[in-house]
Amino acid sequence: MFPSRRKAAQLPWEDGRSGLLSGGLPRKCSVFHLFVACLSLGFFSLLWLQLSCSGDVARAVRGQGQETSGPPRACPPEPPPEHWEEDASWGPHRLAVLVPFRERFEELLVFVPHMRRFLSRKKIRHHIYVLNQVDHFSLRSHPPAPTSFPSRFNRAALINVGFLESSNSTDYIAMHDVDLLPLNEELDYGFPEAGPFHVASPELHPLYHYKTYVGGILLLSKQHYRLCNGMSNRFWGWGREDDEFYRRIKGAGLQLFRPSGITTGYKTFRHLHDPAWRKRDQKRIAAQKQEQFKVDREGGLNTVKYHVASRTALSVGGAPCTVLNIMLDCDKTATPWCTFS
């Protein structure tokens, strides 16, 4: 009844004749053909640029008897990766970074290159030791017996092993969580001559803020670690070994030091751990609930029982480290909570 107020928009390359584009191309192929043509043009342009900057085109032209002016152009170089080599001028001390570890490869891939860059920029001579806890049956060629159970994670015992197995070229250690990355370059990782130095202090750690906390990142000279007899080997599962070690530090008559003048607060570190993705083993089995609050006055560095299954030098993102595959002795008579059986 009324004429339509809408009409098809005429594309600028159409000449008004139905079914044809200007130039005589079929209309039904217009968009597709233009898309393919653009892709082809882009591909051959990139190919020509790569061949020309690498000198292949110049060599091909010379091969056909045509001369080109000037030498062949070199392609722009990619930025070189960061390489940090230790220098004796950095100082007489060398740090062993001890990283208790088990199945947290995503975090390790971030941790090792980050710490290499961070410590090298601060001119801290160091080496990173990844203390990987493995089970006795995990290294067998045949399946484990049905009664075999994996031992629970023991951070403190791994640090004891790392201390004993670290090179004599190191004279102090960092007990370092793999999921905690320092961001503020004003943090001090130097030799803690006066006493243990708690880098991840309660005022700076993103999660733990109680006064006796000494976890996360703690520096000690090897002399002071021996004076404390290392850490207790009785803490299987997550937590409490740091609290017991705080009492060892005080019992050895050592003064604990912490950073000062750091203004970045809880943003001083990046915490990688995702509790929703990787649950912590916080179960308390048998008498463990009562034992976890006691001071272990006999065990420690002198009683840790272990076997190093392998020692491997690796490079992670260009950063060197040593991975120790460590089998810890699970004495179910002394610590029946060392497995879930």
Image (tube, rainbow, N blue to C red):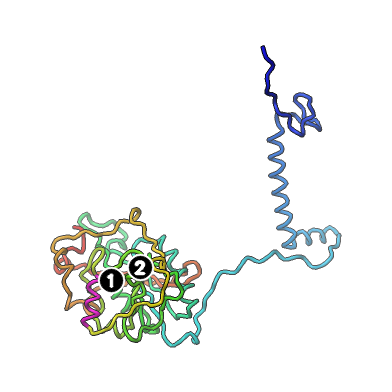
Within 10 angstroms of label 1, few (less than 14), some, or many (20 or more) residues?
Answer: some
Q: Look at the image and say whether residue 120 sits in the magenta stretch.
A: no
From the top left corner, tell me how far across and down residue 43 is, in percent.
69, 49
Q: At x 56% / y 69%, what residue is drawn?
A: 81
Pointer 1 residue: 213
From the top left corner, tell me how far across and down residue 4 is, in percent.
68, 19
Q: Is residue 34 or residue 341 the one in the foreground?
A: 34
Q: Is residue 142 or residue 303 the one in the foreground?
A: 303
Q: CA distance from mark 1 to mark 2?
A: 10 Å
Q: At x 84% / y 65%, what residue is drawn?
A: 69
Residue 68 picture quarter: bottom right
Q: Amino acid at mark 2?
A: His
Image: magenta residue range: 241-251
Q: Tag 1, which secondary structure?
A: loop
Answer yes or no: do the residues labelled 1 and 2 have beta carbons within 8 Å? yes
Q: Look at the image and say whether residue 250 sits in the magenta stretch.
A: yes
- What is the count of numbered marks? 2
Q: Is residue 166 or residue 146 the one in the foreground?
A: 166
Give the side of residue 164 with respect to residue 48, left or right.
Answer: left
Q: Which mark is residue 205?
A: 2
From the top left corner, tell me how far across and down residue 162 is, in percent.
33, 75
Q: Amino acid at mark 1?
A: Tyr
From the top left corner, tell me how far across and down residue 310 is, in percent.
36, 70
Precedes in sequence: disc 1 or disc 2? 2
Q: Which of the image's four quarters has the N terminus?
A: top right
Give the side of residue 1 with respect to residue 257, left or right.
Answer: right
